[in-house]
Image (spheres, coloured by chain):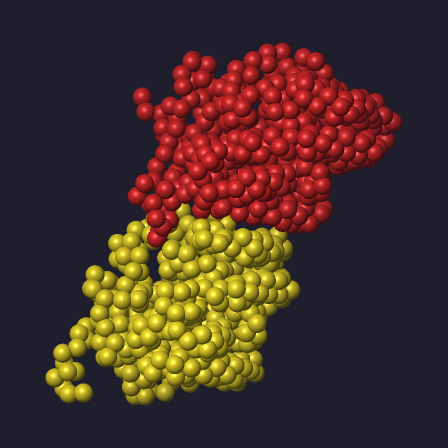
Chain colours: A yellow, B red
Amino acid sequence: MSLEELTSFNWSIMTPEFIIVGVAALLTVIDLFMPKKQDRRILGWIGIAAIFAAMVSLVGLLGAAPDSILDDTFRLDSFGKAFKLLLLAGAALVLFLAISYKADEGMEEYRGEFYYLFLTGLLGGMIMTSSGDLITLFIGLELLSISSYVLAGIRKNNLQSNESAMKYVINGSIATAITLFGMSYVYGLTGTTNLLAIAGTLQSLADAQHAYLLGLAFLMIFVGLGFKLAAAPFHMWAPDVYQGAPTPVTAFLSVVSKTAGFVIVARILISVFGVAATEGPGSMPILYNMQDYIAVVAGATMIIGNVVALKQSNIKRMFAYSSIAHAGYVLVAFTSLSSNFFYTVWFYLLAYLFMNLGAFAIIQLVEAKTGSTKIADFAGLYRRSPVLAVAMGILLVALAGFPGTAGFIGKMNIFIGAFMVQEPHYVLASVMIATTVVSYFYYFGIMTQMFFRPAADDSKFTKIPVGILVVLVVTVAASVLFGVFPDIAIDFVNNNFNQFSDFLQ
Amino acid sequence: MDLSFVLSLLVFSPLLGIVVLAFMPKTEEKTIKIVGFLATLPALVIAIGLYLHYLAGKKLSDFDVAKDWITFGGLQGAEAGFWKVNYELGVDGFTMLLVALTAVVATLAAIASIYIKKEWKGYFMLFLLLEIGMLGVFTAENLVLFFLFFEITLIPTFFLIGKWGYFEKEKAAYSFLIYNGLGSAVLLIVIMILFSKTGTTNIDMLTQIVSDPNVPMTSGLKLGLLIALLVAFGVKLPIFPLHSWMLRVHVQAPPSIVMIHSGILLKIGAYGLIRFGMGIFPEQFESLAVLLAILGVVNLLYGAFLAFIQTDFKMVLAYSSISHMGIVLIGLAALNEAGVQGAIFQVVSHGLISALLFFLVGAFYERTDTSLMENLGGMAKGMPIASGFLLAGALASLGLPGMSGFVSEFMAFLGLFEEMPWIAAVGCIGIIMTAVYLLRAVLGITYGQSHRDFTGVLDLKGVEFIPVVVLIALIVLIGVVPSVLSSPLQATLETIMLGLGG
């Protein structure tokens, strides 16, 4: 590739990525030259500033026509823009949590990494949202995963944190291997790794034997990515990892990492398998043939997530199962693939981002105060700090999907999608709503602790760290705002993303 | 004059009280109680205003309000006004009565909240939130908004029962939450299916669209949806065998909340059946009429027989509520004007009567720390005035002519005898049973053997007179001049009858 060719690229569409990668690199250097005993918190603030800068540059790019560079491996279409916004917002809030995190158990000397690893993880996710090639998708996935492995084990002297990192590495690597194996079939059949080229080749697939091979590839990729989403039955790692990781990292895994997981699933499944013909050109795409498998996974994920969450006594484990359940709800949208699919997934992940990060902010606060993560530690929170208890109450109600909150609108979109397609998914939707009622039990279980039970110790929450305060205000306000005025979100999507119609162009 | 702001003001007026309470110190018991009570007054005044507006012969549709609210994206037909959920409030004769009932009972329950012993600030904030939910449920003009308010009633009630109730309050709160959660889950499925099939949730539009043969809905699907509605509202009403949660709530919740619960929240079930079940699926509703009549008679008899053997007066009243809700079903099953009118009368009348009786239970409990009839005995001596009101309430409940209970039972049975005389005849046993269990309970309390020497037991006094007098007055008013209810209902009934093809 000549220099001329290099400069002819429209590099500006990568500005957000450049900002993140530049600042991440800068932070490593600063970290290196900072005096050993100095507080590394400033690095976190620089990271937040970088994310905001990236967000601003992304907003500047919203009007740009879909474009791709580097041999079509990097493309900025409306799908990429929309989900990149989610990742950036999520990572910014997570960094606010990280700044307020009280380091302990061998984490002191690593604090520098603690901040810029979030940035590299975020970068991986951003690459995934914008990649038009299996290779870049995979690289994004690995970048995100490896950053997360390190983050999970960053509390070096904590046994659970080590266990968490170990389990995550092993499970994650196996999942990656399976995904890669599935991708190799796709490459073998089509001779290219470019998603659009693959789609073009597969559209005219005529040989039924090839369709079987593709089916196999589909299942392997779906299983591998199922690990990423923590979809049942590939969810086993999640509770242990979530419990052992430092709370901001848990928040990162459950929100940013999960969003990125759905991004890669959408990219691969829809652009590769959504058009791959089964019996000659114009026949039913393979993705629709595989709907039943996705439906089973979605159903199992919702049931296992919600039912097992019932008997947890550790709040972080409970939220691990709760986040499994929420992944199941989103998979319902992947099953029905209705015409409002992209909007539905985007909105749900948006709502989930706020609801869940808000809850984790309070978990982190209570954890710092009591030193443990038992659900019983929430007892009497209402007496100790009414404001915190009410904020948590609102977030829990939103997670449970009550009307008036963003969680309800998100669920409503999914239901409408499930019912409006040619063959409505009545059973799956019923499972979803029944498990939602099951989720009332454990969400309201926390409410019972907070509002009805007496506190073990009556000390007040006097000083709430500024980072947590920011997260709480933003998340509670957004959870309610998008629930009462969801048109803000839809107008934004309609004005900027044009129904995501450039996804396959 | 543009009156479209009135209903929004009505529904959200308790919000003012919530805001004021939020800024008050939580130890000021007396002030908090007064503020809580005052905050229910605007809604009451507006509700009375609505009735006066109607009496003046003006249209209730003057109050309709519709604003853009939610749009659902990426769907075809969005330009033509489909896939939209608007903020729509409105009243007709029927809902106006329910709004008035809600406002009255809420104000009186706020007075009954003098018995609340702790954390008055949180209590009244939740109480007012509950009132917003109830007022919204009856004024919402589309299903999504209805569902929103419906769920808003759920959360405060959960906390009000779980925190301020009696010994097994948490268990009662949970069973309330789960049963009603399941009911509303089923309701949500129905709403979403209707929405995705028709593109609208406006009740009037749905009423027209669903009966249109061009809509892609088989009669099987419609029947399925109606049965789902029956289950969803059957939990709320409650219909046997979905009633067990309601017994717990009636026994464990604080009296003021039971007044609201029994007086208003149960009525949402009846309202939903009439407005959505009968209104949107009239044909299918007809095909279920016999089933409904049987369910109604089962409710009536089951409630009555079990009320007869209870030892706790609260349980008697709880079973009596089940029994009386049977009459609503019986009236609806008749599918004729008299029957439906009887059902609606029963809704309003039972709301007033049960509020009265539960207030009195609260008053007795406050003084004696018991609601067991055995321990209460001989109250006529210690609390003659309260005992007198108790007897009056019981007589109203068992359907003494001249009081509201009589009118509603009479019309409901009149309707059913016309259509299904045999089922109605069986149901009549229930009316006799009602007299038996209520008189047994009341006589036990007032003239039964007394176990105490009544020192310190004082009769009703001060503000306690307001609820009992107001409720008795309304009960007698409806009994003597039924047209206060029947004339606003006329238009609604005609619409329903038109849908039923009668």
Residue A44: % across, % down: 34, 74
User: To which quarter of the image does residue A18 belong?
Assistant: bottom left
Horizontally, is A392 left or right of B446 in the view?
left
* Number of numbered discs: 0
Q: Residue furthest right?
A: B449
Residue A94 or A381: which is nearer the viewer? Answer: A94
**In the drawing, does residue A234 fall left or right of residue A453?**
left
Name the outermost residue toward the left: A4
Image point (26%, 54%), residue name: A495
Q: Is residue B300 above or below residue A505?
A: above
Q: Residue at x 40, y 65 (%)?
A: A283
Can residue B46 be seen here? The reply is yes
Q: Quadrant of the C terminus of chain A?
A: bottom left
**In this orientation, does residue B467 appear?**
no
In this view, A216 is above or below B295: below
Give left or right: position of A85 versus A465. Answer: left
Q: Residue at x 22, y 69 (%)?
A: A67
Q: Nearer the viewer, residue A397 or B379?
A: A397
Q: Position of residue A433 (x, y in %)?
A: 55, 53
Q: Nearer the viewer, residue A215 or B404?
A: A215
x and y percentages locating residue B139 in the rendered image: 47, 32
Specify the quadrant that holds the N terminus of chain A: bottom left
Q: Nearer the viewer, residue A294 or A75?
A: A294
Residue B80 figure quarter: top left
Residue A29: quarter of image: bottom left
Name the spot of residue A132 as percent of width and height, x first: 30, 74
